[in-house]
Amino acid sequence: MSQRADLHTHTLASDGTNAPAENVRLAKKQGLAAVAITDHDTAAGIAEAVEAGKEEGIEVIPGVEISSVAGGQDIHVLGYFIPYESAELHERLARLRDARHERNKLIVERLRSLGIDITLEAIYAQKQDVEKNIGRPHIAEELVRLGVVESIAEAFDKYLGKGGAAYTTPKRMTPEEAIKFIREVGGAAVLAHPGLYGDDELVESLIVYGLDGIEVWHPDHDEAAQERYRKLGEEYGLILTGGSDFHGWRGEEPYHAMLGSKTAEMTAVEKLRKIASLRKGR
């Protein structure tokens, strides 16, 4: 077993296709020492993953990926070692999912204005769980099912990604508020995939505001981006993290990338754990 961890994976609790326990088993198969469950605006999948981790002998890091908006685009902040059994945390995350639902309605309205016969009901029917934590990948899947596009990637390129015809970012919390949220609940805050934002001035301002770490190794970062954010993180004394952003399978291909394809050292995990423990007062 390697001393590495995939610190960015999604499950059925948000927009992944695997049950949480499946991610844990896959991490074990990939030879990892640890895996983080970081679903969008929910901690619902963590308890199952933790139990699977005990069975498989692999550490499960309780996490979350908080959705925020700055400059008209989505900015994601990862929180690690969150108190996933806390009722208060679940209540606060539920309020964030309400904002996600509003965005989904706006996207569907824009798609329908473009002449696409898509309904919110059909999209939400994809998930039967209570939380109905629906995101853009579910909308993309419905566009594929309707024959509007041939793939998830095409759906994002044409309609759902930044610059797409139906892209929208309704009022949500700011990245600074997301960082504050994570710190308040006793977690460690890390900026997800900074290379996707095309705004290193914003990235640096969030570092100064109070980030604990930065995601250096990510499938959407080329070597130049990895090196840029590694140097930036070292300059500010941040924890350098990495993860696959694995969302399970779309057809026969892993989406975003295969679990374990991007990782961080376990020393980064220990640093995140220490910060969260201090923040919780333990």
Image (cartoon, rainbow, N blue to C red):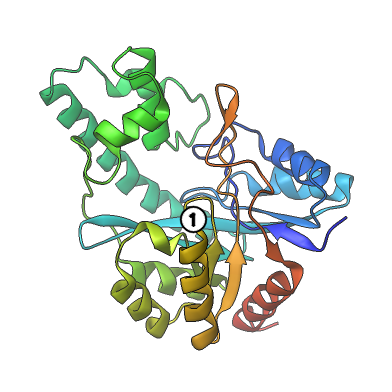
* Residue topped by disc 1: 65
Q: Nearer the viewer, residue 101 or 5?
A: 5
Asked whether residue 114 appears in the rendered view, the answer is yes
As drawn, the residue found furthest toward the left would be 113
Nearest to the observer: residue 43 or residue 261: 261
Determine the residue positioned at 75% across, 68% down. 266
Splitting the image into 4 quarters, where does residue 44 fall? top right
Q: Position of residue 136 (x, y in %)?
A: 37, 36
Q: Can you name the residue that lies furthest to the front here?
A: 224
Relative to 117, residue 55 above or below: below
Q: Is residue 185 left or right of residue 114?
A: right
Q: Where is 153 relative to 265, above or below?
A: above
Q: Identify whether 141 is placed above or below 159.
A: above
Q: Amino acid at mark 1?
A: Glu
Quadrant location of the N terminus? bottom right
Residue drawn at x 33%, y 21% as measured from the top left: 143
Left or right: 19, with 212 as reference point? right
x, y percentage for residue 21? 73, 39
In the image, residue 133 lies at what x, y percent?
45, 38
Q: Secondary structure at mark 1?
A: strand
Quadrant location of residue 82?
bottom right
Is residue 185 among the parts visible in the rendering?
no
Q: Is residue 53 above or below residue 238?
A: above
Residues 53 and 208: in front is: 208
Q: Which residue is depicted at the point 48% across and 57% down?
A: 221
Return the residue nearer the eye: 15 or 147.
Answer: 147
Numbered label tally: 1
The spot of residue 126 in percent (x, y) is 46, 21
Quarter the C terminus occupies: bottom right
